[in-house]
Image: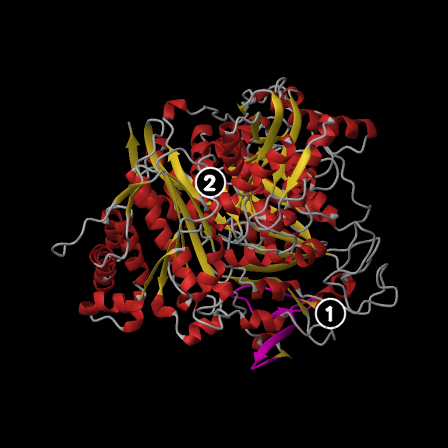
Amino acid sequence: MNPATSYKKKDFVSNQEVRWCPGCGDYAILNAVQQCFASFGVPKEQFVVISGIGCSSRFPYYMDTYGFHTIHGRAPALASGVKIANPDLHVWVITGDGDAMSIGGNHLIHAMRRNLNIKILLFNNRIYGLTKGQYSPTTVPGKKTSSSPFGSLDAPFNPITVALGAGASFVARTVDTQIKHMKGILQAAHEHKGFAFVEILQNCVIFNDGAHAQITDKEVRDARQVDLRPGQPLVYGKELEMGLRFDGEQLLPCKPEEASIWQANSPTGARAFQICQNTEDGSIPVPIGLFRQVERPCLEDAIHQQVKEVTQNLGQGDLESLLRSGETWDVS
Amino acid sequence: MAPNQPEIPLQHLDEVVIRFAGDSGDGMQLTGNQFTETSALFGNDLATFPDYPAEIRAPVGTLFGVSGFQVRFAAKDIHTPGDRPDVLVAMNPAALKVNLGELKEGGLLIVNRGNFSPRDLAKAHYDHNPLDDEKLAENYQLVAIDLNEATLKAVESTGLSNKDALRCKNLLALGMLYYAYGRPLAHTEDWLKKKFASKPQILEANLLALRAGAAIAENSELFKVVYQVNPAPLPTGTYRNIGGNQGLAMGLVAGCQLAKLPLFYGSYPITPASDVLHALARYKNYGVTTFQAEDEIAAICSAIGASYAGSLGMTGTSGPGLALKAEALGLAVMVELPLIVVDVQRAGPSTGMPTKTEQADLLQALFGRNSEAPLPVLATSTPADCFATALEAVRIATTYMTPVVLLSDGYIGNGSEPFRVPAIETLPSFPVRFHTEREGFLPYQRDDQSLARPWVIPGTPGLEHRIGGLEKEDGTGNVSYDPANHERMVMLREEKVARIAESYPPLEVYGEQQGEVLVLGWGSTYGAIRGAVNRCQDANLSVGMLHLRHIWPLPKDLGDILQRFKKIMIPELNRNQLCRLIRSEYLVDAVSIPLVQGRPFTSTELLGHIQDLHA
């Protein structure tokens, strides 16, 4: 039997003791990723898990795959080199809101525009955890933290709009406590040919407990979340008794049968921008699921295609042709 | 030829230094390069020094927009582009003003009289026309000719607009010089035919201008003498003219061929290193992948990722970029992956003078990282030496699983000289084998001799493991905060780099093997030092010369050599960086000869310093 099709979750569990705080949302994500990797049918030596710095970036140590814990913010840049050097590898980047949106923002947007076929999981807990609780680029304004004792003044990023703006070909959001949803999104990210950006709303029990409680708590979840499923109507609620419809620039509550059908592959992605904003006042639910999925050429494919074409045109180079290139003359 | 034309006398010369100077849009670099290539094919030894402004097209006629190209060609072995030119070609008043002071007395001065209108003079801040000054013709062999008018006349038949026609005037000047130095037009004609294959009108005009220049020079007796510089008696072999950045690119490609590895070059554009990226981007059929990253940090990180995945990752930059790469270099030290970082140095600090040369990144290369992060540092010394130094960088990086910094500078990178193409069988061989054996595998187990850890690439079944920037447990590579382990790992990394010195060939001292003065150098000072030391020998001064390719770890035989001389002199284009290192490592009273003017030493300057030290 092909070992790649018979993996169990434990095949992806490393021998290192997991050192996140008890109750951290990262545990659930680790569990889901290990289960998903076991189910993909990919030989485990083909996985490379690459991270930057932060609590989430300890992730590779706990995965029994090839792993690289790099430096702050640079995981997408390093992963780009890995993927270009060996496009056969399955490259997954693990990052957080500080790592990806702040110090590594430049690398993130450029990896997205280039559409390398790598997957990035952004654990968004809206706080710097490992450095003891400073506000991050996704912290809610007014938040009192160790570096903003009187309240944060920074306007935050919405990671989804950043990804959409940078041209990511796959943009999704899921929640640490919603394992089934998360696994569905991870599966879709794996199957997507191109850059997959997945924001995972994640709780930090120590420095930002309840970071997303207003939409992820069991009691409010059904009324406060809408799952974006391509080709399906925008309906939500315990019995899917509520709907949303686009009316020009507005997004309006409606009966489920009047709900707009969600499309993740529109030419501009305008509705993905529209639906993920202005959800703070609670009048419309917060979207999770698949904001965008389109097909675009992958950079690593283009690079290797060009190498192939140039080699066909110019011939395979070797030392002899290298040394004899250019105009030469002989001294005898 | 006109009838009854008197025979122009022919004078044999050992060497000539020509400086072409004009606006940055005048095509001076192109003109200089063509003269260089023609002289190379003729068999001269030569060295070049392009000196151009940072502005791509500075305002026409301004002093800061002057672009220069100096070429020295000789019937003998030479090592520098020469101190002061014998010939100055000045295309406008600004070029004359900037360069005249350096022209040798009695030198040949060719001036484009057509660009000396009151407006041109004002832009160069002349309050009078210097061509009216009788002293000019007394002090120099002045050839003042209206190149504009001559060019317009020469290309009239092509029907080009005046503006386009005037762009050929550099070819006219080149044709004149080809006549004066007995050079054939053929190489440049062939080159033009290739370059303008799709633009027949422009091609025709350029050919006409080139030929007209030679004809005008011959028929109008512009030159009282014509010159002959015979081929140089270079060692036998096949030669090509090579620029430093091109040589580095070729050496890196050859190194990867010898290591049997694909080459990945991640880089961000920066003067004067971008030409390495440009050159490598053309070598795609040699298993080369180039990646123009979003910034300097991404460039080095992508290269580390590529090395991790089984290519030889490389990046190239200049001083400011090396500063940005420092943290990632530390990561490469920690994860012990091969990596090559090329630093084509320029004058700093900060943005400094990007188009001017300097050697002031030495200490940054050695120590510019947080904590104890030792790595080997190599320095190339001439455009032709770039090839061998690049090979050595690949050998060290792959043999010892370490990042390597290779220092060049703008003077080497932009300069050119004949390069004797090595025979393939003389090249070293160091094929890389990735580790695939499962039995007893540990990510940080070490080779007994080199102390290198195994290179295991993702995709290898059964060897899944994790690496990263956190301190490693000796052997397993697991994260460790154990105090004794940390100290052991710091010392292991240090010892691994120190052992590289065991693989060096013995040092070779040029000139006196012991005695009064040793001139110790590194990098682009090679030519100037060699020229000065040769002149010392002619004057019977006891002087030895030692030039370092390996800056770190220092060669094991260096200490003994330093002891053989009474005085050690270290000229460098910084305030004293190698000198500090030598003084601290060997406790010798080395004398620093610093120069930080954004230009190389002249041999004459160094001769003076050596004489002072002897006195």
Are tags 1 and 2 found on a single chain?
A: no
* In the rendered image, the vertical position of residue B467 relative to residue B70, given as above or below: above
Q: Is residue B80 left or right of residue B10?
A: right
Residue drawn at (82%, 69%), measured in percent from left and top?
Answer: A142
Where does residue B356 sit, x and y in percent of width and height?
Answer: 55, 52
Where does residue A32 sit, x and y in percent of width and height?
Answer: 66, 46
* In the rendered image, the vertical position of residue B262 relative to residue A28, given as above or below: above
Residue drawn at (82%, 66%), measured in percent from left and top?
Answer: A143
Callout 2: chain: B
Q: Is residue B303 visible?
A: yes
Q: Which element is circle 1 on?
A: loop
Amino acid on which the number 1 mark rests in the picture:
Ala
Q: Which mark is residue B159?
A: none
Classify mark 2: residues with Cα within 10 Å, few (<14), some (14-19) or many (20+): many
Where does residue A172 sit, x and y in percent of width and height?
Answer: 60, 59
Where does residue B279 sit, x and y in percent of width and height?
Answer: 42, 46
Residue denoted by label 1: A155
Q: Which residues are magenta?
A: A226-250
Amino acid on which the number 2 mark rests in the picture:
Thr
Q: Which element is circle 2 on?
A: loop
**Labels 1, 2: front one:** 2
Residue drawn at (45%, 52%), measured in percent from left and top?
Answer: B103
Quadrant housing residue B442: top right
Residue extending farthest top: B448
Between residues B173 and A247, which one lies in front from this camera angle?
B173
Callout 1: chain: A
* In the rendered image, the vertical position of residue B282 relative to residue B235, given as above or below: below
Between residues A71 and A217, which one lies in front from this camera angle?
A71
Residue A135 on the magenta span? no
* In the rendered image, the vertical position of residue B36 relative to residue A98, given as above or below: above
Residue denoted by label 2: B80
